[in-house]
Image (cartoon, rainbow, N blue to C red):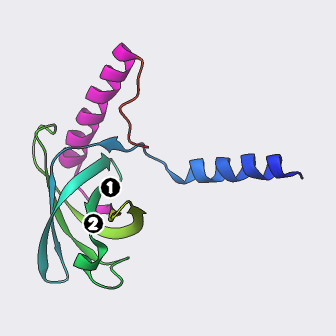
Amino acid sequence: MGKCSVHILLEDIVRERRRNHRFNLQGRVQLDLGGKHFEFPAADISVSGVGVMLDVAVLGAKPAGEVGICTIESPDLAATVEAYVSVMRIRRVGHQHLVGLRFESINDEQLQIIRAYEDLLAGRRDKSGHSPAAH
């Protein structure tokens, strides 16, 4: 197997990891985690979770795996979304960190709000030929 084959195989594996497309989201996320209350700017959203931008030190040394309650507010969403989340991934983006919060428990009504936002963006993409997806 040559280098090109390995590269293509790895690319396919990385692509497979993401089950749901993320869509850019303007708004704020309030997070109750470890007895503390935080508020961060939203970065993106999908039916499986939400991304927030922050200084990782705000959450403490090793927040991955911690579970809390998040409230997502955005003028782009039909209503506020609330869910139990866990801290999944932390990735450096410039001087900040993109923290992925995975929905651990979210009801169908809340998921429908997110799906409606995704459908709206998909409709815009179809008309313009460009994708509004974040990743």
Tell me, yes or no, whether the highlighted magenta stretch contains residue 116. yes
Q: Main structural element of the magenta stretch: helix, strand or loop? A: helix
**Residue 49 against residue 55 in the figure, above or below:** above
- Location of the C terminus by quadrant is top left
Q: Give whichever of 45, 92 is nearer the camera.
A: 92
Q: In this view, does 79 lie above or below 66?
A: above
Which amino acid type is marked by label 1? Gly
Of mark 2 and mark 1, the one earlier in the sequence is 1
The picture quadrant where one finds residue 31 is bottom left
Residue 34 is left or right of residue 49, and the answer is left
Q: What residue type is labelled 2?
A: Val
Residue occupying the point 28% across, 51% down: 43
Residue 122 percent across, percent down from the top left: 35, 26
What is the x, y in percent for residue 92? 41, 64
Q: Are marks 2 and 1 in contact (CB under 8 Å)?
A: yes
- In the image, residue 119 lies in the stretch drawn in magenta: yes
Circle 1 SS class: strand
For image coordinates 58% across by 47% down, the residue present is 15
The span picked out in magenta is 99-128
Q: Left or right: 43 with respect to 71?
A: right
Residue 33 image position (x, y, % from top left): 19, 77
Residue at 83% over, 52% down? 3
Which residue is identified by label 2?
A: 85
Mark 1 highlights which residue?
Answer: 49
